[in-house]
């Protein structure tokens, strides 16, 4: 079971979540649902 972080402020939570999403989400990989374009190209 993973522990969830406790954020002191909304801004701290926002920064950490944004950082996680940027590291997790692959915006260069092509996808069939996007007519075989990357999300950036779509």
Image (cartoon, grey):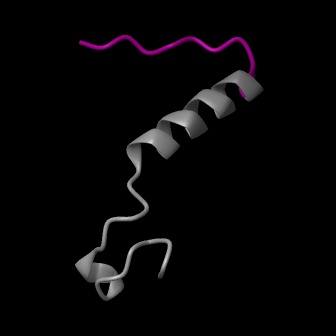
Quadrant where the image shows the N terminus:
top left
User: In the rendered image of this protein, does residue 29 appear above or below residue 32?
Assistant: above
User: Relative to 42, does residue 18 appear above or below in the rendering?
Assistant: above
Using the rendered view, name the quadrant where residue 28 is placed: bottom left
> How many discs appear?
0
6 on left or right of 10: left
Q: Residue at x 38, y 55 (%)?
A: 26
List the single residue furthest toward the front: 28
Q: Is residue 36 magenta?
A: no
Residue 32 image offset from top left, x and y in percent: 24, 80
Instruction: From the viewer's perspective, tell me whether residue 36 is left or right of residue 11.
Output: left
Between residue 41 and residue 9, name the one nearer to us: 41
Residue drawn 51% across the image and 45% down it: 22
Residue furthest bottom in the image: 35
Residue 13 lies in quadrant: top right
Residue 38, horizontal then vertical, whole percent:
39, 74
Where is residue 39 drawn, in percent x and y? 44, 72
Please say whether residue 9 is one of the residues in the magenta stretch: yes
Examine the residues drawn in magenta and state their main secondary structure: loop
From what the image shows, is residue 16 above or below residue 8? below
**Magenta segment boundaries in residue numbering:** 1-10
Q: In this view, does 18 lie to the left or right of 40?
A: right
Q: Which residue shows up at 31% across the image and 88% down it?
A: 35
Residue 34 lies left or right of residue 5; in this view the side is left
Q: In which quarter of the image is residue 24?
A: top left
């Amino acid at each position: 079971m993973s522990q969830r972080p406790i954020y002191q402020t909304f801004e701290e939570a926002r920064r950490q979540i944004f950082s996680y999403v940027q590291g997790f989400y692959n915006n260069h990989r092509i996808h069939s649902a996007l007519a075989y374009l990357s999300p950036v190209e779509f």
